[in-house]
Image: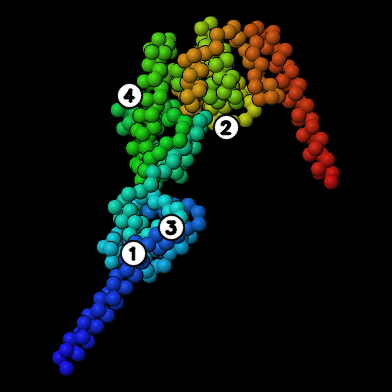
Amino acid sequence: MSHFSLRESLYLILLFGIIFLMVFVSRSSRLHGDLAIETDVQIELLLYDRTDLEQLADELLAIGVDVNRNELIWAGHTLGWRFFRPGRYVIDGATSYSDFLSKAARGMQDPARVTIPPGTDIGRLSRSLGAQLRADSSDFHSLFRDSSSIALEFELTGEDLFARMLPNTYEMYWTSSADGAVRRVLREFDRLVADRYRTEIEENELTLSQILTLASIVEWEARFHDEKPSISGLYLNRLDRNMQLQADPTIAYALGERRRLLFEDYRFDHPYNTYIIPGLPPGPITNPDLSSIRAVLNPEQHDYLFMVATPEGTHHFSRTFEEHRQASEIWRRWLREQHRIRDERESADSGD
């Protein structure tokens, strides 16, 4: 009888062992299996603040992640991950509860790709950075003031600091502060411009700020990169001859809008109107890209003093005012023809 009881006890122990093993394997599979959290496409989760398990589950479902809400909460409690740090977390394909929850709880966020476009202005750049990072656009805008901490630290005006926002795509954490993001771009400017072209900058008759100011005009003026050295050379020729720069982009900047200029615009009294003021304007009108900066440091050597747009979007360069007058007349005739075609089309459309 005692022998039978012992055998039964062994069976029970074995049965409990099998059940325990099955539960352990099932639990481990649920916690560490790669198919716990799934997406068909890459999805980014943005956590603006410290987030608990229930909030995290709701955020994942809201952005289209295939996840079992109750099981996620159970997994978080089981693994000890109950609060998650602000950040940008990328979910691509399938992942396990343990991997994802530990990543978000530790704040091991995925870097964001932040793009700074060329030829923008302070307002647009601030809004763009505010849309790409957690920091508010107003935080960026305040850094491009003369009194900002970074401008004072580097003895720059706010506009000079803005001109150093080198167009490129940068990897940085989404939670970076506005100050940290601007300093990151400034370091890249120093590496790719100030350090790489140190000799050319030191030997140039213009200061670095003046180089950037002229480069910003070239950036605005040139539609095609291969024209930039020619445009830069023309403006430098005018500066060497103490001629007014007469750069249309500076008037557009003064007016605060990009449009075809009218005759009265050229008389607009403004410190950036280079048809009135001598030399360069007080500061940059946009943030130039690397090719515009290189064009000022290494301009094309020629005798051109005038240029006018062409229908192809390029420029016709002239050495004398008479040549320029003839080229300008061709441009005006083309514009008049475009207006005539547009008016006829609008008249025909209204007739229909």
Please, what is the three-letter code of the amino acid marked with disc 1? Leu
In the displayed structure image, the side of residue 121 where residue 86 appears, left or right: left
Category of crowding for the residue at label 2, using alpha-carbon neighbours closer than 10 angstroms: few (below 14), some (14–19), many (at least 20): few
Query: Which residue matches tag 1?
Result: 31
Secondary structure type for disc 2? loop
Secondary structure type for disc 1? helix
For the residues labelled 4 and 2, the Cα–Cα distance comes to 29 Å
Name the spot of residue 349 as percent of width and height, x first: 81, 43
Name the spot of residue 242 as percent of width and height, x first: 52, 7
Q: Earlier in the sequence, mark 1 or mark 3?
A: 1
Q: How many labels, in total? A: 4
Depth check, mark 3 against mark 2: the one in front is 3
Please, what is the three-letter code of the amino acid marked with disc 3? Ala
Name the spot of residue 287 as percent of width and height, x first: 47, 28
Secondary structure type for disc 4? loop
Category of crowding for the residue at label 4, using alpha-carbon neighbours closer than 10 angstroms: few (below 14), some (14–19), many (at least 20): few
For the residues labelled 3 and 2, the Cα–Cα distance comes to 48 Å
Query: Which residue matches tag 4?
Result: 155
- Please say if the residues under marks 1 and 2 sit with CB atoms less than 8 Å apart: no
Depth check, mark 1 against mark 4: the one in front is 1
Please, what is the three-letter code of the amino acid marked with disc 2? Glu
Q: Earlier in the sequence, mark 3 or mark 4?
A: 3
Query: Which residue matches tag 2?
Result: 257
Q: Earlier in the sequence, mark 1 or mark 2?
A: 1
For the residues labelled 1 and 2, the Cα–Cα distance comes to 57 Å
For the residues labelled 1 and 3, the Cα–Cα distance comes to 13 Å
Query: Which residue matches tag 3?
Result: 94
Name the spot of residue 78 as percent of width and height, x first: 28, 66
For the point 34% across and 61% down, the residue is 32
Depth check, mark 1 against mark 2: the one in front is 1
- Please say if the residues under marks 4 and 2 sit with CB atoms less than 8 Å apart: no
For the residues labelled 3 and 4, the Cα–Cα distance comes to 50 Å
